[in-house]
Image (cartoon, rainbow, N blue to C red):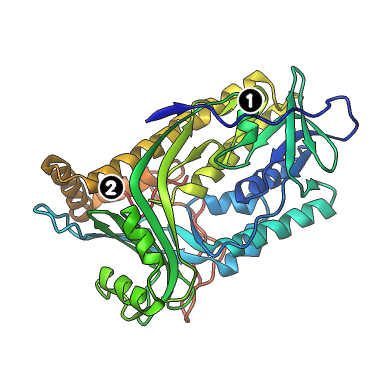
């Protein structure tokens, strides 16, 4: 584990130059940045979104729990829900082959009165829905959009000036949504703590002969999780965590050979398989910011945290950043406060610290428990899954605890809305207000 600073910040722009003046400037126009800009301007906060649009991205994202609520509040969900596939069941299968093996366990959203734990979407569909909503907000005069890179940051006592090729933007607060190597974070002097793993995630999409039944299935293997997540029809997305050399070798296999290897690893659970999308091997590592706000800069998304794609926590964690920050800034605005005031930054830092640190540590422990052959680790994981499988009250308590506030002991989250099912299934309503924590990797 290493503490590190960031790349040297580019020189600051001329703060005296004319330009746009807003309460908040969001730097970075990927999904986290677009969500932040839409959420803030939707609360009546003068906002600018700075950054070029994202390029094509064939990967997928599982939006769990209240992530759909964040997108609904931002106006994005109605444009996306028809292409979102419900995740009704989370299945965990111990495929470690070790002396102590956990029982198979399946968690059903219906046990909590929910239509689904979440929804799987392609990143291209997600980005398109967000871009359409951004364009509508710009047309309505609610959002300033500058589709260019930020070229520098001048941070002063009373505001920040963001330099761009389209002219400077003056703001009380900069929301850094500019990625893992965030220049805005560097300008604010915020350091990160990071560590890496001897693993990589092989990702692709595939078709299969048998229906997935809207179940996400995760095999726990000695090298890491192998996770199939439903897409429309008889298709699924795959995240296969392996040793780096093995993951790279998979990307080089011929399509037919690769398809047979994936089917073998999945124990033919979904029948014959055929890879139908691009493949990539992504090195696994984690970084977490030491602070989530400082010097009129607040971090969202990978500017503040990056964790392995285990348990679907990546974008879901980023959308929780957005929800917390929007509530805090909107509360300050109602009282006539400064969006970048120390009290706002301190409140946001407190709100995100425990959540992000808890997720990062939890995913780290889960991952290391799979990699370790240490018998007590295997006993603990197996016992936990056995209890979850065989003791219904504890099982429901675990699911509610994972879903977070909003799903209390007396009942589930409200069902409504309609993300469409494929292949003749019924409509699945959208669960309301559970905070995102529960995913395929509960243990």
Q: Secondary structure at mark 1?
A: helix
Residue 420 position in % (x across, y down)? 53, 71
Element on which disc 2 rests: loop
Residue plotted at (38% across, 51% down): 311
Query: Is 123 or 428 nearer to us in this picture?
Result: 123
Query: In percent of the image, x 65 and y 45: which residue is there?
Result: 33
Q: What is the crowding at mark 1: few (fewer than 14 residues within 10 Å), some, or many (at least 20)?
A: many
Q: Does residue 92 appear to the left or right of 181 in the view shown? A: left
In the depicted structure, whether residue 310 falls above or below residue 274: above
| Residue 133 found in image quarter | bottom right
Question: In the shown orientation, is residue 269 left or right of residue 87?
Answer: left
Q: Quick one: quadrant of the N terminus?
A: top left
Q: Nearer the viewer, residue 48 or 260?
A: 260
Cβ atoms at labels 2 and 1 below 8 Å apart: no
Find disc 2 in the rendering and name its residue: 443
Measure how far apart labels 2 and 1 are at the Cα level: 36 Å
Residue at (46% x, 44% y) in the render: 406
Q: How many C-alpha atoms fall within 10 Å of the one at disc 2: few (<14), some, or many (≥20)?
A: some
Quarter of the view holding residue 161: top right
């Amino acid at each position: 584990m290493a503490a590190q600073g960031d790349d040297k910040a580019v020189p600051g722009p001329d703060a005296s130059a004319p330009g746009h003046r807003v309460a908040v400037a969001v730097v970075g126009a990927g999904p986290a940045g677009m969500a932040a800009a839409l959420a803030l301007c939707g609360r009546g906060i003068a906002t600018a979104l700075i950054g070029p649009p994202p390029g094509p991205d064939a990967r997928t994202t599982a939006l769990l729990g209240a992530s759909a609520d964040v997108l609904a509040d931002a106006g994005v969900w109605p444009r996306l829900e028809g292409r979102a596939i419900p995740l009704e069941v989370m299945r965990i299968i111990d495929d470690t082959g070790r002396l102590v093996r956990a029982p198979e366990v399946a968690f059903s959203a219906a046990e909590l009165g929910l239509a689904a734990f979440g929804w799987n979407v392609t990143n291209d569909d997600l980005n398109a829905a967000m871009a359409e909503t951004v364009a509508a907000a710009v047309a309505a005069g609610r959002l300033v959009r500058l589709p260019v890179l930020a070229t520098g940051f001048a941070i002063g006592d009373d505001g920040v000036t963001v330099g761009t090729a389209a002219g400077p933007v003056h703001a009380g607060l900069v929301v850094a949504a500019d990625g893992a190597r965030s220049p805005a974070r560097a300008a604010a002097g915020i350091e990160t703590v990071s560590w890496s793993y001897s693993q990589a995630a092989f990702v692709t999409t595939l078709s299969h002969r048998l229906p997935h039944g809207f179940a996400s299935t995760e095999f726990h293997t000695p090298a890491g999780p192998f996770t199939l997540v439903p897409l429309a029809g008889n298709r699924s997305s795959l995240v296969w965590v392996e040793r780096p050399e093995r993951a790279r070798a998979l990307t080089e296999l011929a399509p037919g050979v690769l398809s047979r290897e994936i089917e073998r690893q999945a124990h033919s659970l979904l029948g014959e398989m055929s890879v139908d999308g691009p493949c990539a091997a992504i090195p696994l590592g984690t970084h977490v910011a030491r602070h989530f706000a400082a010097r009129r800069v607040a971090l969202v998304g990978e500017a503040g945290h990056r964790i392995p794609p285990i348990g679907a926590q990546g974008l879901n964690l980023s959308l929780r950043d957005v929800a917390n920050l929007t509530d805090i800034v909107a509360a300050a605005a109602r009282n006539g406060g400064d969006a970048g005031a120390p009290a706002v930054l301190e409140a946001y830092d407190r709100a995100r610290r425990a959540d992000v640190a808890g997720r990062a540590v939890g995913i780290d422990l889960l991952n290391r428990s799979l990699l370790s052959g240490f018998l007590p680790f295997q006993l603990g994981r197996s016992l936990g899954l056995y209890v979850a499988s065989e003791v219904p009250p504890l099982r429901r308590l675990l699911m509610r605890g994972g879903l977070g506030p909003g799903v209390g002991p007396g009942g589930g989250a409200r069902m409504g809305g309609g993300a469409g099912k494929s292949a003749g299934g019924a409509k699945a309503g959208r669960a309301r207000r559970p905070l995102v924590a529960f995913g395929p990797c509960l243990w």
